[in-house]
């Protein structure tokens, strides 16, 4: 256990070497892999739009009541909560591509199951398919880590930015897929909702092909960055090989590392704030008399905030540090959270939703980069999995609590909740010391000392 604890330490894993302190050239192989991953992220984004767009309507159709309209989104968040860490264990043991193939396979099975359920009007089959699809979507979140693995600390957040920008294409491709299903379904004698889900594999199969062409596995690149970036000198403890077994690391060890604590808490606050505000965004706009087209435009601008600035934010995190970009994210998200529930003006509320998404984007880029900075390649999958578990918990609990809270004290009070969410991560970030981007001046967590084995008694 002592060896594994030292590997997870923050002070010794992946510091910026003198040569890597600048901006080393990106090798052609890494450029090619990044392009494949960005395209894969775009395709995945198309499929991921199905649940927030159609989920509530399908539940109401199958159950005949709006009582459980939020069940689809809740199940997706719960599946992400449960599947993220086990998927990280798989990617640490067998490579990032193995986890991605597993996630894509489950997503395809789940989407077809949901489509058939809508054809058969079967609520039980629908919820079963949704669980399978949700577990698959949770597993595919490891795409971000695959991007971070291929870059040295001085360009790591930039590499993330390239891939995350692909999500913007996917977010707007989802409505196109649904519109295609709506136009084609009558001629096939199918419900548009059923056909839309049956079309999802058409975007996931190309995604699997793109992942297949990513070579070598990003985990192997991460273990040998010095081969791809001449002059980069990783520390001895970070020089692992893919043939070596993943270190045995417990969740407790991740949580004892202060930079990781900051990352997890910041991610929880930003993701929870965004989930809560987007759950209430339509309520706020409808309350002030705005129709569905205006609400749709507001959501579209929110998505632009989430993904459209990933690349410049990544470059900023490489230039000024992960800590400073996370601080910026908290300020933007808190400001946006104060505008959405309090203003009666459409463009002010929409600006708020945009800022909430932009603040989340700051955290999404910087948090993943920090976790990659502070974790060796063979343990990063679990670190990202634990981070996504925090996201899943936030996406379930905060929107559920926000509804009764608004009913009790009114919508404007939600601005106070948003501000309160930012306080703890703000204090923790102010205590985080990052002398240069990707390096953290904190002692590693103390290594656990295994108890000595009892010796057999000597025979007299």
Image: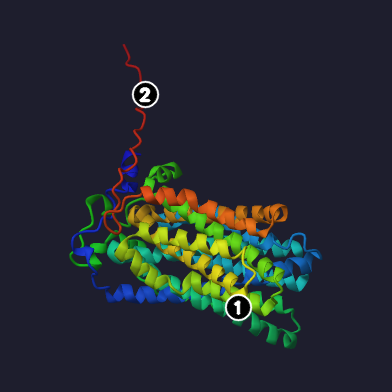
**Looking at the image, do the residues carrying marks 1 and 2 touch, with CB atoms under 8 Å apart?**
no
Residue in the image at 36% along x and 32% along y: 450
Category of crowding for the residue at label 2, using alpha-carbon neighbours closer than 10 angstroms: few (below 14), some (14–19), many (at least 20): few
Residue wearing tag 1: 297
Q: Secondary structure at mark 2?
A: loop
Category of crowding for the residue at label 1, using alpha-carbon neighbours closer than 10 angstroms: few (below 14), some (14–19), many (at least 20): few
Give how far across and how far down residue 99 sits, in percent. 47, 61
Q: Is residue 316 left or right of residue 274?
A: left
State which quarter of the image contains the C terminus: top left
Nearest to the observer: residue 246 or residue 346: 346
Q: Is residue 270 left or right of residue 436?
A: right
* Picture disc at residue 358: none
Residue in the image at 56% along x and 61% along y: 338
| Residue 110: quadrant of the picture | bottom right
* Picture disc at residue 454: 2
Tell me if residue 23 can be seen: yes
């Amino acid at each position: 256990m002592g060896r594994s604890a030292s590997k997870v330490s923050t002070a010794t894993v992946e510091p910026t070497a003198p040569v890597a302190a600048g901006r080393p050239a990106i090798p052609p192989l890494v450029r090619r892999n990044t392009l494949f991953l960005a395209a894969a992220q775009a395709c995945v984004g198309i499929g991921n739009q199905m649940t927030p767009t159609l989920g509530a309507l399908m539940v109401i159709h199958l159950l005949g009541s709006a009582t459980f309209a939020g069940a689809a989104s809740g199940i997706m968040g719960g599946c992400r909560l449960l599947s993220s860490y086990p998927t990280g264990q798989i990617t640490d043991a067998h490579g990032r591509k193995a986890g991605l193939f597993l996630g894509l396979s489950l997503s395809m099975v789940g989407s077809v199951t949901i489509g058939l359920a809508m054809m058969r009007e079967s609520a039980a089959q629908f919820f079963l398919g949704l669980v399978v699809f949700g577990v698959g979507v949770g597993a595919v979140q490891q795409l971000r880590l695959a991007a971070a693995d291929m870059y040295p600390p001085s360009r790591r957040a930039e590499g993330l930015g390239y891939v995350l920008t692909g999500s913007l294409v996917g977010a707007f491709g989802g409505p196109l897929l649904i519109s295609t299903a709506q136009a084609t379904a009558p001629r096939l004698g199918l419900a548009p909702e059923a056909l839309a889900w049956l079309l999802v594999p058409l975007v996931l199969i190309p995604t699997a092909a793109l992942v297949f062409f990513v070579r070598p596995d990003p985990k192997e690149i991460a273990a040998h960055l010095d081969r791809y970036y001449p002059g980069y000198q990783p520390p001895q403890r970070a020089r692992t090989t893919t043939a070596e077994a993943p270190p045995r690391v417990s969740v407790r060890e991740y949580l004892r590392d202060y930079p990781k604590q900051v990352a997890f808490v910041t991610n929880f606050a930003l993701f929870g704030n965004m989930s809560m505000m987007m759950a209430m965004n339509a309520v706020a706009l409808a309350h002030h008399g705005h129709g569905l087209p205006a609400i749709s435009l507001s959501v579209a601008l929110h998505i632009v905030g989430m993904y459209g600035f990933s690349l410049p934010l990544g470059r900023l995190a490489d230039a000024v540090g992960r800590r400073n970009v996370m601080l910026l994210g908290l300020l933007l998200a808190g400001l946006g959270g104060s505008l959405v529930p309090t203003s009666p003006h459409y463009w002010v509320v929409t600006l708020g939703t945009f800022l909430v998404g932009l603040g989340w984007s700051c955290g999404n880029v910087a948090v993943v980069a920090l976790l990659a900075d502070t974790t060796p390649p063979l343990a990063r999958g679990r670190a990202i999995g634990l981070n996504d578990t925090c996201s899943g918990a936030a996406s379930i609990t905060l929107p559920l609590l926000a509804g009764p809270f608004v009913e009790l004290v009114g919508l404007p009070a939600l601005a106070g909740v948003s501000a309160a969410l930012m306080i703890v991560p703000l204090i923790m970030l102010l205590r985080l010391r990052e002398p240069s981007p990707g390096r953290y001046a904190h002692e590693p967590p103390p290594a656990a000392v295994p108890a000595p084995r009892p010796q057999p008694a000597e025979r007299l």
